[in-house]
């Protein structure tokens, strides 16, 4: 964004080798090599992860092939393993969590960055960042012992308003995909707020002054100038939140009901990929059963890549529209 | 001066090497259910035999079987006996047999939450299987009212709760249901995780008991120790002799005494015959290779088994584990000689 200052260090070419040594001595080359190593390490870790997941899931991959992704039965006794209920639960809970968290998170970020007095803003931001550091098992326990009873209490109200949709039908036992989504939303909101606030604060003052000078009100400036400018960063915060919710294990398994079935109602129990791996891996015996759980890890990896890719495409398309 | 130093060095080295030879570290891994008992035993054993340290990682029965088969630990521990296939795999990989040694007993109890019902309920095996198969859906089902004369059971739907994590508790529960219900045996079967026909999954004993406490008209199952230590109320279960028996350390030990013990100790004692026997009981086992190369380790493991079966058994009630019946102890003491 800021124009790079062009300070060229073009020393007189006195042979290639000496130029290399010069750069080495000035530190550029060293910094380049070190940072390159860091980047390659990350790449290598990711690659090794995929290779290991792939290798260790050989038995179920050979047995089930692609039908692993579409089969709905999960029966360790009979040796039948299908991933679809877990994929469904993972995607649905993360999507609903984002639907709850995005307006709340972005709204709070706008308030903290644009409207709140600096003192209050800083204090609140500090608290929110603390929230991001709470271990997920704590959120899970709060989910079981506080959120679930609270949801049971307000269930009639939710049903009265939204009960006509199939999303909120059927019996509600407290633990459900809906409870998991709410817990996830609470967990990812700090990420959205914290990063979005930074991004909004980073919008150059000139942008705001320009809009105000043209006669825009404070809110018009925020809505029409600041937010479009910060859109990419806000989207980034949402991606991070999405990644966290897709992979969240402990808090989800404690409130989702752990039932590997596909129900249309959010009030029904479900299951997520990360949750079933955490639940069953320790006691899984046999290459097929363990392999199926490892293959679920591979599926989660693929799912994250696909969803992130789609989201990035969405951002690209909307940015173009905005620029036109 | 130099000579004296040299002699001293030689002496010191000798002392050190003797001390090194005696010190032995044994690694073990496996079941989580007996972990509090095992860690107490290993600590007490070390006081008695200071040269032996036993490290135990409570990673779960499946992990215990896998690690002892892979040879990464000296012995394993499991809440369920190894299957014939697993034992063959061990034989193929390690070139020797694996031995099962029962250590303590556990039990699984039904727990429930029905508003307005304070009485301790009686459950028949048919009732529990019916509820968990999704065939008995209301608390006032005849199968339940018949077993509980004088208790007014409501016409509400039963909410079924089960463990979501793979667990020996689920294994014992499913093993019992398989014995009392043909349909359970063929439709669901027994394993540390099964395909549940109905119900919600809670993670761990605390997840199940939490769900049961918060959901009206629900039923779940937890380990007896968990129920005792958290002062939960739980139901009686009908035993093979037709009596309703409350789970207790005594009635669980009675189940082990009632069962006929095969030579390899791999026996299920759910629905065991006899009077005053709690039917949803089980052993938990140590898995010990029959050939141990290192003579020091072999001696240490044998010492531990001898101690565990005699002095160790006296410590079990303090931690709410049911001790082994004397007949089983005698038989196991003889079996220690199989370790070579």
Image (cartoon, rainbow, N blue to C red):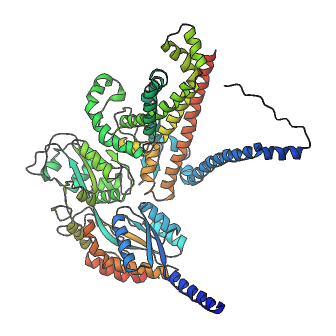
Q: Nearer the viewer, residue A289 or B184?
A: A289
In the rendered image, the residue lying farthest to the right is A14
Q: Residue at x 42, y 66 (%)?
A: B82
- Residue B324 visible to the viewer: no
The residue closer to the viewer here, A87 or A247, is A247
- Residue at the front extreme? B1
Q: Position of residue B194 (x, y in %)?
A: 38, 52
Residue B257 appears left or right of A97: left
Q: Quadrant of residue B140?
A: top left
**Residue at the image point whose x is 47% and y is 44% from the top:** A273
Pinpoint residue A59: horizontal percent, then vertical percent.
55, 54
Residue B273 position in % (x across, y down): 22, 68
Depth check, front residue: A18 or B237: A18
Q: How many marks?
A: 0
Residue A300 vs residue A316: left or right?
left
Relative to A308, is B79 on the left or the right?
Answer: left
In the picture, measured across the screen, residue A120 lies left or right of residue B257, that is right
Residue B325: which quarter of the image? Answer: bottom left
Which residue is drawn at the image coordinates 52% and 82% (left, top)?
A: B21
Quadrant in which the N terminus of chain B appears? bottom right
- State the residue at coordinates (17%, 65%): B241
Task: For residue A298, say whether it is visible.
Answer: yes
Q: Position of residue A75 (x, y in %)?
A: 42, 50
The residue positioned farthest toward the left in the image shown: B150
């Amino acid at each position: 964004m800021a124009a790079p200052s062009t300070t060229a260090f073009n020393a007189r070419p006195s042979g290639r080798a000496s130029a290399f040594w010069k750069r080495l001595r000035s530190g550029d080359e060293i910094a380049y090599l070190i940072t390159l190593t860091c980047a390659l390490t990350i790449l290598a870790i990711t690659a090794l992860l995929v290779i290991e997941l792939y290798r260790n899931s050989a038995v179920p991959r050979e047995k089930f092939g692609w039908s692993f992704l579409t089969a709905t039965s999960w029966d360790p006794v009979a040796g039948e393993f299908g991933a679809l209920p877990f994929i469904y639960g993972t995607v649905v809970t993360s999507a609903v969590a984002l639907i709850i968290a995005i307006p709340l998170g972005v709204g709070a970020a706008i308030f903290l960055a644009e409207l709140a007095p600096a003192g209050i803003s800083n204090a609140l931001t500090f608290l929110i960042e603390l929230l991001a550091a709470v271990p997920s098992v704590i959120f899970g326990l709060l989910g079981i012992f506080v959120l679930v009873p609270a949801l049971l209490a307000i269930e009639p109200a939710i049903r009265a308003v939204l009960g006509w949709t199939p999303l909120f039908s059927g019996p509600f036992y407290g633990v459900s995909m809906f409870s998991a989504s709410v817990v996830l939303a609470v967990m990812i909101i700090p990420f959205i707020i914290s990063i979005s606030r930074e991004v909004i604060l980073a919008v150059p003052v000139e942008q705001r002054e320009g809009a105000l000078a043209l006669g825009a009100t404070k809110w018009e400036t925020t809505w029409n100038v600041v937010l479009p400018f910060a859109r990419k960063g806000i989207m980034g915060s949402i991606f991070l939140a999405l990644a966290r919710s897709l992979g969240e294990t402990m808090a989800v398994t404690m409130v989702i009901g752990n039932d590997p079935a596909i129900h249309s109602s959010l009030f029904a129990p479900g299951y997520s990929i990360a949750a079933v791996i955490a639940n069953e891996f320790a006691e899984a015996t046999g290459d097929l059963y363990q392999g199926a759980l490892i293959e679920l890890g591979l599926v989660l990896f693929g799912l994250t890549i696909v969803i992130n890719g789609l989201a990035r495409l969405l951002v690209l398309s909307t940015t173009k529209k905005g620029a036109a | 001066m130099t000579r004296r130093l040299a002699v001293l060095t030689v002496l010191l080295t000798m002392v050190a090497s003797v001390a090194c030879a005696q010190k032995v570290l044994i690694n073990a891994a496996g079941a989580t259910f007996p972990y509090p008992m095992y860690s107490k035993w290993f600590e007490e054993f070390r006081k008695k035999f200071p040269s032996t340290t036993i490290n135990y990682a409570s990673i779960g029965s499946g992990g215990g079987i896998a690690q002892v088969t892979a040879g990464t630990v000296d012995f394993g521990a499991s809440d369920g006996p190894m299957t014939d296939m697993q034992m063959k795999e061990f034989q193929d990989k390690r070139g020797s047999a694996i031995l099962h040694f029962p250590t303590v007993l556990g039990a699984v109890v039904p727990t429930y939450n029905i508003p307005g019902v304070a009485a301790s309920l009686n459950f028949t095996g048919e009732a529990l299987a019916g509820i968990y198969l999704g065939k008995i859906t209301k608390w006032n089902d005849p199968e339940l009212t018949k077993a509980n004369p004088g208790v007014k059971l409501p016409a509400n739907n039963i909410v079924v709760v089960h463990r979501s994590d793979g667990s020996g508790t689920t294994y014992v529960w499913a093993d019992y249901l398989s014995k009392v219900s043909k349909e359970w045996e063929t439709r669901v079967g027994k394993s540390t995780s099964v395909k549940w026909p109905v119900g919600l999954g809670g993670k761990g004993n605390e997840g199940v008991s939490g769900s049961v406490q918060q959901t009206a008209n629900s039923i779940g199952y937890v380990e007896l120790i968990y129920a005792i230590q958290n002062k939960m109320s739980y139901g009686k279960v009908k035993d093979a002799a037709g009596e309703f028996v409350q789970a207790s350390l005594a009635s669980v030990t009675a189940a082990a005494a009632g069962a006929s013990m095969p030579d390899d100790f791999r026996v299920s004692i759910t629905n065991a015959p006899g009077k005053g026997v709690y039917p949803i009981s089980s052993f938990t086992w140590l898995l010990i290779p029959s050939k141990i190369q290192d003579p020091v380790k072999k001696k240490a493991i044998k010492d531990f088994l001898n101690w565990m079966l005699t002095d160790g058994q006296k410590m079990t009630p303090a931690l709410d584990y049911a001790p082994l019946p004397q007949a089983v102890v005698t038989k196991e003491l003889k079996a220690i000689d199989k370790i070579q």
